[in-house]
Image (tube, rainbow, N blue to C red):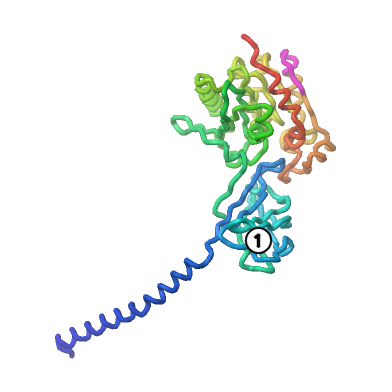
């Protein structure tokens, strides 16, 4: 057995060896750090735009990496998987590359039309056969920018229960207010549809400047009459604050919505007929609101524009026909537009409830021109 002195010597020797080992690693660590600093630090931004087909990528900006000479669009392959509304299933997709453009501090990759709405894309990869170091995946994208939609800001009620996205342009006079209700199941992606965002686009604002309010309603609340009514009350409270501040016109409050949103627009007009100038309802889900179907007399003074596809797979077109008839009988002013199969197909819709843009999306045909906007903005609140 070693004595105490020998044990101390062994411990000293062990410490010296460990110190020597650590010192021998310092130059290596320094070299590694220098190499990391010298290497290119790449960042990737997805630039998207809300088009007729929803949110679509228009450019991927790669910064911190130079584009080698001779790289062509055909050197790239973009493939991935996407889901859809209300489904956990996924399907593969591919997209061709239209342009590869050198930039000051990197390069831009411009895809052709994405076959799927970007919100539903679950994963994708871009592979470059000629220069593999240019390849990247969706997981490497650090930021997604969406033109116009990013100009909306979140509003919250004092108790944080009710929320809305709002677009409020600068103006020197009170502006009309367009309240756009999204459909059921579209809480998270309401700003990926043109229905709300289109009103805020520069070309729209140049002709019809307006404030846009898009309430954010979760699915559980959407099914409850009292919860929808709370949303209506809160929206009017926000508008009243803007009226008091001199930024909103009290005589030009317009309501619009599709599916459950169309139903909500009609209900809000029925509950607050003295506040609303006109209503545009797309394929309104009135079969889910017996109360609304019995309250047409409450909004007789408010013009109503109903829009639906003849072969809507989700809400039968008979719902809009019956609504138009009942509102007319009550003494109301109504326009009913039913799109034929040919009109929906010409607008790009594909029949089938499983389709991303099925015949339930009457906005595809409606937004082909601005007649709906002309009609809506031609009305002011009727004097009491």
Q: Residue furthest left?
A: 4
Q: Residue furthest front?
A: 104
Does residue 153 show up magenta in the picture? Answer: no
Q: Quadrant of residue 271?
A: top right
Looking at the rendering, the stretch of residues picked out in magenta corresponds to 327-335
Q: Give me the residue at 70% from left, 54% from top.
A: 111
- Residue 287 visible: no
Q: Quadrant of residue 191?
A: top right
Label 1: few (<14), some (14–19) or many (≥20) C-alpha neighbours in 10 Å = many
Residue 306 percent location from the top left of the image: 73, 26
Vertical placement of 255 versus 67: above or below? above
Kind of element beneath mark 1: strand
Q: Residue furthest top?
A: 384
Residue 285 percent location from the top left of the image: 68, 30
Residue 110 percent location from the top left of the image: 69, 54
Vertical placement of 314 versus 293: above or below? below
Q: Quadrant of the C terminus?
A: top right
Residue behind mark 1: 126
Q: Give me the residue at 65% from left, 18% from top.
A: 277
Q: Residue furthest bottom?
A: 1
Number of labels in the image equals 1
Which of these two is toward me, 205 or 80?
205
Which of these two is toward me, 324 or 127?
127
Residue 141 percent location from the top left of the image: 57, 55
- Residue 13 visible: yes
Does residue 333 show up magenta in the picture? Answer: yes
Q: Give me the residue at 67% from left, 23% from top.
A: 279
Q: Quadrant of the N terminus?
A: bottom left
Vertical placement of 244 versus 225: above or below? above
């Amino acid at each position: 057995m070693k004595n105490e002195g020998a044990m101390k010597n062994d411990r000293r020797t062990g410490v010296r060896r460990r110190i020597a080992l650590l010192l021998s690693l310092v130059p290596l660590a320094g070299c590694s750090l220098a190499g990391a600093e010298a290497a290119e630090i790449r960042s990737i931004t997805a630039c998207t735009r809300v088009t007729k087909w929803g949110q679509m990528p228009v450019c991927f900006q790669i910064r911190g990496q130079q584009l080698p000479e001779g790289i062509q669009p055909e050197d790239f392959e973009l493939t991935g998987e996407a889901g859809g509304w209300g489904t956990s299933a996924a399907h593969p997709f591919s997209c061709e590359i239209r342009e590869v453009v050198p930039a000051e501090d990197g390069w831009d990759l411009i895809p052709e039309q994405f076959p799927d709405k970007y919100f539903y894309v679950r994963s994708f990869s871009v592979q470059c056969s000629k220069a593999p170091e240019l390849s990247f995946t969706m997981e490497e994208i650090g930021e997604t920018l969406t033109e116009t939609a990013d100009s909306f800001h979140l509003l919250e009620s004092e108790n944080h229960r009710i929320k809305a996205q709002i677009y409020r342009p600068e103006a020197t006079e009170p502006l009309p207010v367009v309240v756009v209700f999204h459909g059921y199941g579209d809480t998270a992606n309401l700003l990926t549809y043109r229905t709300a965002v289109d009103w805020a686009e520069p070309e729209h604002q140049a002709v019809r400047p307006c404030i846009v309010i898009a309430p954010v309603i979760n699915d559980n609340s959407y099914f409850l009459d009292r919860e929808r009514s709370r949303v209506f009350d809160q929206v009017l409270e926000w508008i009243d604050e803007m009226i008091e501040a001199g930024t909103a016109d009290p005589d030009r409050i317009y309501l619009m919505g599709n599916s459950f949103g169309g139903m909500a627009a009609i209900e809000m007009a029925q509950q607050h007929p003295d506040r609303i100038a006109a209503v545009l309802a797309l394929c309104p889900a009135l079969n889910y609101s017996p109360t609304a179907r019995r309250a047409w007399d409450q909004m007789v003074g408010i013009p109503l524009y109903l829009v639906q596809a003849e072969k809507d797979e989700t809400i039968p077109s008979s719902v809009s026909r019956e609504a138009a008839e009942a509102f007319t009988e009550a003494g109301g002013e109504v326009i009913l537009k039913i799109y034929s199969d040919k009109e929906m197909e010409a607008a790009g819709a594909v029949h089938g409830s499983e389709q991303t843009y099925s015949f339930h999306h009457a906005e595809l045909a409606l937004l082909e021109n601005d007649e709906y906007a002309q009609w809506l903005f031609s009305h002011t609140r009727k004097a009491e």
